[in-house]
Image (tube, grey):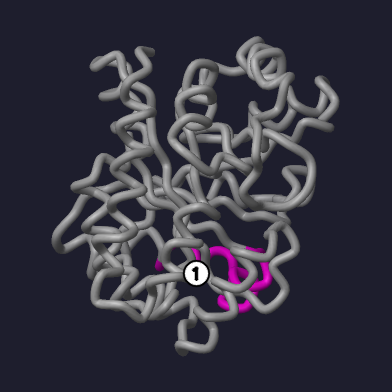
């Protein structure tokens, strides 16, 4: 098992729900990314998603688009993100998923990228624009290198396609709780329980729910149906507000601590 699989196995043993946080790598810089990762590990984050900056992030709303822009402006490149993961690994074993667009992988070469990512300490890839039908030998290469190929399932995904996708995935299934791009929302989707139940009929993989979860109350509600809760834009928004402040770690950790407590208050 890799670190993602081990973490979910531990959560099951402890009767706990998982808490996943997304941040943009290199926002405001890669040194801050490393420090945030270490702080979030201590704050109760089970899995860290690092968004690799890309110039055309089609799946992202404004908050995460701006984070990607700040990452690019700080000089962040894909190789530098992998160096940062390696630096995090020297002090932490928090599972790390790269949230990435395929162009960035293709530029280096699929086989080489996966091998380099595995050596750096990456545990899984969530490739936003790589449909399973076009993944060719991607999943085989991922498993050969001990990485989890993580796929998204949307509210609009037909059930037969849902079944096809989850059979190809590893680590966990990322259920997008609403239509559209990433971003904070005022309420969670009304059909969440029904959609998660559909997924559970087709897979034994843990189901993580994200897109729109923005406060502890919502996180607690989502945790009642999901195996893990993903929070991105709300945390990224704190980084945007305090990225140049000496209080960045403190400010971001206050929200992350509150979210973690809310998720962990729900028994599996």
Q: Quadrant of the C terminus?
A: top left
> Which quarter of the figure has residue 173?
top right
Residue in the picture at 50% in, 62% down? 237
Q: Is residue 120 above or below residue 263?
A: below
x and y percentages locating residue 130 in the rendered image: 71, 54
Q: Is residue 36 above or below residue 31?
A: above
x and y percentages locating residue 201 in the rendered image: 65, 10
Near mark 1 (Cα within 10 A), the count class, few <14, some 14-19 or many ≥20, is few
Q: Is residue 242 magenta?
A: no
The magenta stretch spans which residues?
101-116
In the shown orientation, is residue 153 left or right of residue 149?
A: right
Q: Is residue 257 above or below residue 15?
A: below
Residue underneath mark 1: 112
Residue in the picture at 67% in, 33% down? 177
SS at mark 1?
Answer: helix
x and y percentages locating residue 174 in the rendered image: 59, 36
Compare residues 208 and 128 and report the one nearer the observer: 208
């Amino acid at each position: 098992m890799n670190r993602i699989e081990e973490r979910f196995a531990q959560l099951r043993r402890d009767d706990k729900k998982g808490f996943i946080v997304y941040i943009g790598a290199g926002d405001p810089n890669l040194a801050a990314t490393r420090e945030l990762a270490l702080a979030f590990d201590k704050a109760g984050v089970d899995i860290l998603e690092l968004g690799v900056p890309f110039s055309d992030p089609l799946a992202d709303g404004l908050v995460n688009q701006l984070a990607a822009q700040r990452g690019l402006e700080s000089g962040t490149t894909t190789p530098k993100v992998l160096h940062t993961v390696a630096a995090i690994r020297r002090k932490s074993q928090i599972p790390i998923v790269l949230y990435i667009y395929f162009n960035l992988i293709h530029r280096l070469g699929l086989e080489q990228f996966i091998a380099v990512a595995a050596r750096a300490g990456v545990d899984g890839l969530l490739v936003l624009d790589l449909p399973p039908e076009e993944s060719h030998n991607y999943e085989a290469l991922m498993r050969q290198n001990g990485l989890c190929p993580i796929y998204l399932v949307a509210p609009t995904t037909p059930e037969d396609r849902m079944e096809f996708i989850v059979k190809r995935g590893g680590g966990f299934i990322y259920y997008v709780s609403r239509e559209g791009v990433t971003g904070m929302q005022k309420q969670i989707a009304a059909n969440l329980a029904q959609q998660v139940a559909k997924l559970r009929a087709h897979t034994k993989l843990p189901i993580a729910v994200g897109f729109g979860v923005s406060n502890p109350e919502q996180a607690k509600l989502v945790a009642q149906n999901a195996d893990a809760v993903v929070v991105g834009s709300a945390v990224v928004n704190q980084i945007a507000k305090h990225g140049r402040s000496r209080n960045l770690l403190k400010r971001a950790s206050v929200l992350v601590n509150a979210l973690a407590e809310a998720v962990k208050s729900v028994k599996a």
